[in-house]
């Protein structure tokens, strides 16, 4: 029944939903707005929104400029200072108090689809975030994206301090060095992945910069093929190469074969100067001193990832 | 530049960009800070040119821009790899940033140019032009340095190339005097220990975005990236795989082309995205051939090997060139008349390909002269291989469906389903050449014999030969007899993921919502220890924006993973045991058939798992100019079926943020993050005991039927319980910092400080006389030394305006790092690690590893704004 109803609904081609606006107010034009909001206009004039609305509007909605986002302002100017009259205009600050759902609806009137195809149901939407929790459409604070902070990363860090701390660790992605942004890997507007990855999987995300790891190799290493995060922390680590645990202990979490050298307790006596015989499986790259092609080998004799 | 849906390169900048931004004065007319709906302050904007005051050319084009340049002095030339990992500071003149904008108000056309770090290894440039709300073209170029080490002890010429020749004084193949060879390698490494191994990543890209028709947009982008440099790479050498590893410099000469093309439609009711992407990766150096400086001596009694010293070089097959293609379609349709719902569907298909030419097992023609593939060529030719090129393909498939409905004004329900597959589209590589006929002189039978597909051929695949060296011939010693653990076939790791379940969001009040979700994820894998795993997840979350001036977000999730039968040794079908059945004769050593991975071991990505996750976040507006954010995260995962392997993982994090911005001339911030992580793992050190048919073991008498269960079982001869050991890996991290900006009339002062502390401790438990013997136990103690990193960063700037257009910014930067890593202890003075200088070394580990640094540098920068 649901399928039939849904198909019927699609065939019926209903009108796109539009938000109920400001108690039936009418448009007053941006000149009236600017008369009181000159400082805001000084900054708004430098935004891509202002340029689009004022220099090359595509429809009637864009032509009304301020009111295309805030809604028609006739009820607002009747009593602009009264907190009780804030329902007469859509605002995008906590002070103003417009429900988040309505704020988002206003933005999606123009920004629906594209990069925001999966906003609904995304982690950020589920946590009731508003577009203006990250964006400030009224001023050009950031180089791109009309963000609330000077950069993409600083904007994300305002909620994701855990990741900010990881990017400050011994080995890390070059995010705080200004060479990467969170958006290189994640789509904060929603994606089909739970962690808002832009690609279909963790590995495909990593391959977008590390294509040499993609292979497919003649001899593949199961956890590498399965998920880069089996061994690496994506953001940063106290260990070399973003590893989750120091080698050889990392490798020994899966490798415990009786033959050879997988299962011994490699201990501090094997460190150079540790008092015992220096152990090659502890020093430097540890297991990768020999198994150096650990992401996969294309050598016909590379079964052990040594060539 | 940023496209949050596709592609990388979403930002242009470098490590100096933030410093410049911090010094920019705010607009004094913007008096009152506002907060986001969550309650975090919007950053006050910088002062801008007012409308009508923009500078114009005679033709009506408005222009504006700024530039910052100056000189940096002090310790900015410091070479430490930690200091320069992703940046390129230096003591010299510096064009830090610039931007220039043109705008034609009559038509909406514009041009924007920006860049920075000119002539340095972290430089970047961008140009964007077009017509607002119509079309735009973006061009960009960015360089990212990546310094791996500045303390590599070079012993070869040709670093960065695919052919490494030993420095003068070192002998390819070594000499008859191993002690002299060790001394020569040590002297060469120490004499060249200041060698930097680094990678440079240069990316050039272009993108066109255009409004095609009403509701239709399109984009086309192309980027080419070149990576050049070298990095340390282990290379084992000699005696079958365990002796004298030498750290060679792997050359990097990669080219990657990324192509993206897409169409987007949205009319408020229906949305459609179609995207094609291609990634073309080329490694311009296929193999690395390196001369080796040591003499691999034939073992006693071997008469069929090349003369000692014949093994002069080794060859590594470097990462192969590959291509990847993907076609993706995304569709969403609103259903306003059907419970105000929507329906979305995504389908995506792709393929990864790699068909590099393969290289022979060995480059030494005289190896195995008594074993030749007379039909196809010798071991040093590709004729001995089962195929001449890799011929590897993996197909990827994705389908993702969502139906969202609102049965009431307060309730939203979504049904989600997802299928994702990666599948090898080629036959796995056969290490045995099924077409070859091996002729050999078997010590066990006089004269040459034709054996067809024999163990001798198999032997050539693994062990001695892989090192391009070793004096051992395959027909001698134990190798004359079949064994059961020689890889003869490559595994293929296909996987299918199914994920489905409902979610619900319920609006409790105008300002609070409750959300919940149930989900099952089923993953089927080939060639893994578990053919199938399934994980059930339940999550509940609560958001309240109405707690006075605060916003609360809290969630809890429980996950439970289980799976099909776990087979600790899953590769048996890929070993020579598939050709040679386990011997059944009493007294026969069957260790290579029966003794595998401890059957109690569980790979942590497949084992049973019970995981709890909790998140809490509170944002509070304490005063109009002061807000505070607190967040807590905790994860606790246990693996109940993992008697050995990873048994538990704990992660905890606590974070505090304070933002202060009472007016445009003052701002400040503080932050603190504390993280703790623990991973517990255990295993049993092998007793290296042989298993023979008929042998009585603690687990029973060995028969061909029970040999594997007895051979790999905990408590058996190979894995006596006394050899069990446990390790606890504990991570502690603190990151804290703060900063401020204070304007004194026209002069601005800003400072930013942060300190990052990382500690990693690995403690272990064992039984003396078991995993560690009584003699070693006193020096082994109970833990490894702590891995420690302390990083300090301070950036102070004073900006003094000289006029409306000119200003001077004085910068002071302090950076320091203290690092201790036991992996590299002693390698700066002893890169050639040898228990006995007369023997082949334990290893020639030429990278001395990271070291401390402390840097102060100063900058005087001139700013021009127009």
Image (tube, rainbow, N blue to C red):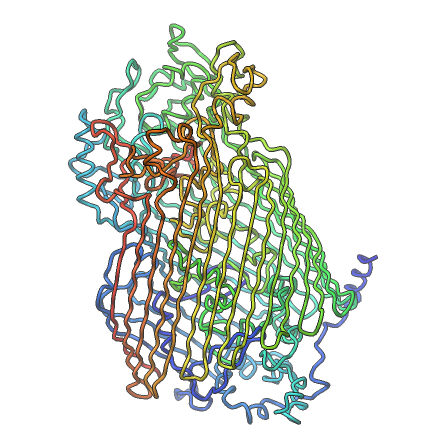
Name the residue rendered at 31%, 75% in the picture: B797
Instruction: State the image coordinates of residue B92 (x, y, percent, origin top left).
Output: 22, 67
Q: Is residue A295 visible?
A: no
Residue B283 location, quadrant: top left
Instruction: State the image coordinates of residue B587 (x, y, percent, origin top left).
Output: 48, 10
- Number of marks in picture: 0
Residue B861 location, quadrant: bottom left
Q: Residue furthest top?
A: B446
**Left or right placement of residue B56 versus residue B435 in this view:** left
Q: Is residue A97 visible?
A: yes
**B325 to B387, vertically: above or below:** below
**A250 to B5, vertically: above or below:** above
Instruction: State the image coordinates of residue B858 (x, y, percent, origin top left).
Output: 25, 70
Considering depth in this image, is B27 or B796 the residue closer to the camera? B796
**Left or right placement of residue A197 versus residue B769 in this view:** right
Name the residue rendered at 59%, 17% in the picture: B705
Considering depth in this image, is B772 or B183 the residue closer to the camera? B772
Instruction: State the image coordinates of residue A63 (x, y, percent, origin top left).
Output: 61, 84
**Left or right placement of residue B504 versus residue B264 in this view:** right
**B54 to A197, vertically: above or below:** below
User: Which quarter of the image is occupied by the C terminus of chain B?
Assistant: bottom left
Considering depth in this image, is B570 or A65 the residue closer to the camera? B570
């Amino acid at each position: 029944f649901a399928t039939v109803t849904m198909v019927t609904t699609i065939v019926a081609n209903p009108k796109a939903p539009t938000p109920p606006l400001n108690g039936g107010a009418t448009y007053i034009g941006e000149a009236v707005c600017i008369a009181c909001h000159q400082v805001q206009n000084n900054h708004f004039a430098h935004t891509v929104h202002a340029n689009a609305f004022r220099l090359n509007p595509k429809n009637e909605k864009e032509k009304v400029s301020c009111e295309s986002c805030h809604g028609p302002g006739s009820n607002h100017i009747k009593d602009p200072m009264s907190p009780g009259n804030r329902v007469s205009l859509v605002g995008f600050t906590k002070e103003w108090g417009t429900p988040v759902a309505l704020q988002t609806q206003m933005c999606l009137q123009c920004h629906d689809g594209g990069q925001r195809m999966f906003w609904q149901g995304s982690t950020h939407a589920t946590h009731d975030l508003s577009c203006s929790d990250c964006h400030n459409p009224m001023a050009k604070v950031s180089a791109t994206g009309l963000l609330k902070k000077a950069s993409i990363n600083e904007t994300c860090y305002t909620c994701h301090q855990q990741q900010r701390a990881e990017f400050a660790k011994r080995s890390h992605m070059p995010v705080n060095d200004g060479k990467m942004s969170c958006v290189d890997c994640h789509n904060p507007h929603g994606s089909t992945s739970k962690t808002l990855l832009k690609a279909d999987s963790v590995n495909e995300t990593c391959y977008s910069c590390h294509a040499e790891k993609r292979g497919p190799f003649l001899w593949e290493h199961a956890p590498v093929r399965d998920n880069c995060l089996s061994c690496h922390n994506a953001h940063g680590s106290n260990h070399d190469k973003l590893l989750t645990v120091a080698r050889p202990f990392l490798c020994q979490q899966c490798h415990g074969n009786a033959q050879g050298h997988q299962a011994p307790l490699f201990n501090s006596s094997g460190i150079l100067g540790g008092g015992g015989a220096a152990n090659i499986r502890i020093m430097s790259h540890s297991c990768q001193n020999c198994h150096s092609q650990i992401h996969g080998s294309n050598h016909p004799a590379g079964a052990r990832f040594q060539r | 530049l940023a496209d949050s849906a596709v592609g990388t390169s979403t930002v242009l900048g470098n490590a100096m960009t933030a410093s410049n931004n911090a010094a920019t004065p705010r607009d004094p007319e913007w008096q009152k800070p506002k907060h986001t709906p969550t309650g975090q302050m919007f950053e006050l904007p910088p002062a801008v040119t007012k409308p009508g005051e923009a500078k114009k050319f005679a033709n009506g084009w408005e222009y504006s821009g700024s530039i910052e340049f100056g000189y940096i002095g002090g310790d900015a030339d410091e070479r430490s790899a930690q200091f320069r990992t992703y940046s390129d500071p230096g003591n010299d003149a510096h064009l830090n940033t610039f931007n220039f904008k043109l705008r034609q108000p009559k038509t909406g056309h514009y041009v924007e140019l920006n860049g920075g770090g000119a002539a340095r290894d972290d430089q970047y440039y961008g140009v964007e032009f077009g017509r607002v709300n119509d079309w735009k073209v973006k061009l960009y170029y960015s360089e990212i340095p990546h310094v791996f080490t500045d303390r590599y002890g070079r012993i070869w010429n040709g670093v960065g190339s695919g052919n490494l020749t030993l420095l003068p004084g070192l002998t390819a193949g070594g000499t008859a005097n191993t002690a002299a060879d060790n001394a020569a390698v040590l002297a060469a490494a120490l004499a060249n220990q200041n060698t930097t191994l680094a990678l440079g990543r240069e990316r050039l890209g272009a993108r066109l975005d255009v409004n095609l028709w009403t509701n239709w947009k399109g984009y086309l982008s192309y980027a080419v990236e070149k990576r050049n440099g070298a990095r340390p790479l282990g290379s084992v050498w000699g005696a079958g795989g365990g002796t004298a590893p030498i750290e060679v410099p792997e050359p990097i000469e990669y080219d990657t082309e990324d192509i993206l093309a897409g169409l987007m439609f949205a009319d408020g009711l229906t949305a459609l995205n179609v995207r094609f992407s291609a990634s073309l990766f080329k490694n311009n150096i296929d193999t690395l051939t390196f001369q080796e400086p040591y003499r691999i001596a034939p073992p006693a009694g071997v008469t069929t090997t090349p003369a000692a010293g014949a093994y002069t070089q080794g060859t590594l097959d470097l990462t192969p060139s590959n291509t990847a293609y993907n076609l993706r379609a995304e569709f969403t349709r609103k259903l306003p008349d059907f419970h105000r719902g929507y329906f979305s569907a995504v389908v995506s298909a792709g393929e990864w390909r790699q068909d590099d030419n393969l290289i022979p097992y060995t480059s030494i023609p005289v190896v195995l002269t008594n074993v030749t593939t007379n039909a196809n060529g010798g071991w040093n030719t590709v004729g001995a291989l089962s195929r001449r090129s890799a011929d590897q393909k993996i197909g990827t498939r994705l389908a993702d469906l969502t139906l969202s409905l609102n049965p009431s004004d307060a309730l939203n329900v979504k049904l989600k389903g997802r299928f994702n597959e990666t599948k090898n589209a080629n036959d796995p590589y056969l290490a045995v050449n099924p077409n070859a006929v091996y002729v050999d002189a078997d010590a066990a039978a006089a004269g040459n014999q034709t054996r067809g597909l024999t163990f001798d051929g198999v032997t050539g695949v693994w062990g001695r030969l892989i090192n391009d060296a070793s004096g051992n011939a395959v027909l001698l010693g134990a190798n004359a007899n079949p064994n059961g653990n020689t890889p003869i076939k490559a595994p293929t790791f296909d996987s299918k993921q199914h994920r489905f379940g409902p979610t619900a969001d319920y609006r409790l009040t105008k300002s609070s919502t409750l959300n919940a979700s149930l989900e099952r994820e089923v993953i089927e894998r080939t060639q893994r220890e578990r053919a199938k795993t399934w994980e059930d997840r339940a999550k509940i979350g609560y958001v309240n924006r109405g707690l006075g001036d605060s916003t609360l977000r809290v969630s809890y999730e429980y996950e439970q993973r289980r799976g099909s039968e776990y087979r600790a040794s899953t590769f048996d079908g890929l070993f020579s045991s598939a050709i040679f059945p386990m011997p059944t004769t009493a007294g026969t050593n069957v260790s290579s058939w029966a003794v595998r991975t401890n059957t109690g071991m569980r790979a942590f990505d497949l084992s049973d798992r019970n995981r709890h996750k909790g998140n809490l976040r509170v944002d509070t507006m304490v005063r109009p100019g002061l807000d505070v954010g607190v967040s807590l995260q905790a994860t606790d995962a246990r693996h109940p079926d993992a008697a050995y392997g990873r048994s538990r993982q704990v992660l905890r994090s606590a974070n505090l943020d304070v933002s202060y911005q009472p007016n445009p001339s003052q701002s400040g911030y503080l932050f603190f993050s504390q993280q703790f992580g623990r991973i517990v793992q255990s295993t049993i050190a092998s007793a290296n005991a042989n298993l023979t048919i008929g042998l009585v073991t603690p687990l029973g008498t060995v028969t061909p039927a029970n040999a594997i269960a007895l051979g790999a079982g905990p408590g058996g001869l190979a894995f006596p319980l006394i050899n069990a050991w446990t390790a606890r890996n504990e991570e502690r991290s603190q990151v804290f910092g703060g900063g401020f900006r204070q304007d004194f009339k026209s002069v601005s002062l800003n400072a930013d400080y942060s300190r990052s502390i990382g500690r990693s401790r690995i403690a272990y438990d064992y039984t003396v006389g078991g995993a560690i013997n009584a003699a070693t136990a006193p020096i082994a103690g109970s833990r490894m030394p702590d891995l420690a990193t302390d990083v300090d960063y301070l950036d102070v700037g004073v900006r003094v305006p000289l006029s409306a257009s000119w200003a001077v910014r004085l910068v002071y930067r302090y950076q320091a790092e203290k690092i201790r890593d036991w992996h590299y202890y002693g390698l700066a003075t002893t890169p050639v690690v040898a228990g006995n200088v007369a023997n082949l070394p334990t290893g020639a580990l030429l990278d001395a590893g990271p070291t401390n640094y402390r840097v102060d540098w100063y900058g005087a920068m001139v700013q021009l704004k127009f």
